[in-house]
Amino acid sequence: MSDESSLDRIASALERMSPGPARPPDLTVAPAFVWNPACNQLDPVARVNHVDLSLLVGIDRARDDLMHNSLQFARGKYANNALLWGARGMGKSSLVKAIHAQLAVRFSNLKLVELRREDLNSVGTLLTRLRRRSERIILFCDDLSFSGDEREYKSLKAVLDGGIEGRPENVVFYATSNRRHLMPRDMIENERSTAVRPSEAVDEKVSLSDRFGLWLGFHPCHQDDYLEMVRRYCESAGLTIDDETLQSGAREWQMTRGARSGRVAWQYFVHLASQSGS
């Protein structure tokens, strides 16, 4: 075997062991993407699972504030990172997806990129891939919380603060959480009880949520809002049902679930639709 052939084989082996830099992602192929750190790529989502914005009831203030912030961002103006926190099933993640869907009709370069909580450690790589892109990107992390992993906590700080380079101008970060300070109270109390300087230790942990410029609280809905949610779902699907029957059934459904929320309203609508054969 010639020396030249041997060198070619060695070069090919080295290329397989250490591949070249990943190609820039093509963000024109879909309105949304999911970050895949294992492959160092953005997987396109051709159709985002979302509800129409008009179907979200009882969260008008949060809807208007997040819409204004997102519209400013889509226009290339200043916008805040946003933390949507509060009661389960009240439309936090649905609001983010619904607003993106509505704005994407007007702003084709507005993209939604989902970052899973367990992939926070790779966010630096993701930001490098998104930096200096022409698209405006809403980086979305659903159900964000921490249980003690310092690496994930510090990775998120990198997203919000951006290090010496700063957060990319074309990226804004939206997160949802059931917890206002992104961590359970017993974890905060443990920091207070074990630290040499308790107040400093607690301040360091809870200060993470302070890095979100926009806080939007979601609270358990009233009975009227709950019933209105069911009505709008039925109207949207063309499902006709007597209002008295709807109300009595919705109340009974809520009692069996032990909760009243947008998610429970949707589940009752699905039950009604299945009973009618829709």
Image (cartoon, helix red, strand yellow):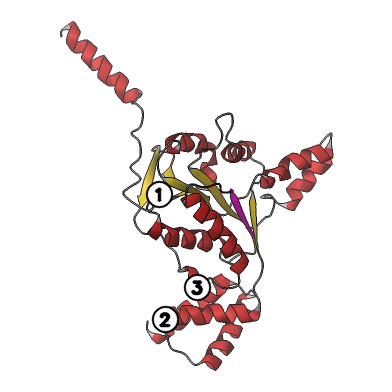
Q: Is residue 90 above or below residue 197?
A: below
Q: Nearer the viewer, residue 171 or 114?
A: 171
Task: Report the number of discs.
Answer: 3
Would you call the spot at circle 2 few (<14 residues within 10 Å), some (14-19), or many (20 or more)? few
Q: Which residue corresponds to mark 2?
A: 274
Counting other residues with Cα less than 10 Å from the Cα at mark 1, is it few (<14), some (14-19), or many (20 or more)? many
Write down the region rendered in magenta.
77-85
> What's the amino acid at mark 1?
Phe
Locate residue 20: give its quadrant: top left
Give the alpha-carbon distance from disc 3 to disc 2, as whole Å. Answer: 20 Å
Q: Residue at x 44, y 62 (%)?
A: 102
Residue type of the residue flagged with mark 2: Ser
Residue 26 drawn in magenta: no
Residue receiving disc 1:
33
Alpha carbons under labels 2 and 1: distance apart: 32 Å
- Is 6 left or right of 160, judged from the image as shown? left
Residue drawn at 61 percent across, 36 percent down: 151
Give the Cα separation between the discs numbered 3 and 1.
Answer: 24 Å
Q: Which residue is mark 3?
A: 55
Counting from the top left corner in percent of width and height, residue 131 is at 45, 36
Name the residue type under label 3. Leu
What residue do we see at 59% from left, 69% from top?
A: 60
Camera-near label (3 vs 2) is 3
Nearer the N terminus, badge 3 or badge 1? 1
Q: Nearer the viewer, mark 2 or mark 1?
A: 1
The one nearer the camera, 54 or 248, is: 54
- The first of marks 2 and 1 along the sequence is 1
Image position, residue 244 (x, y; %): 55, 93
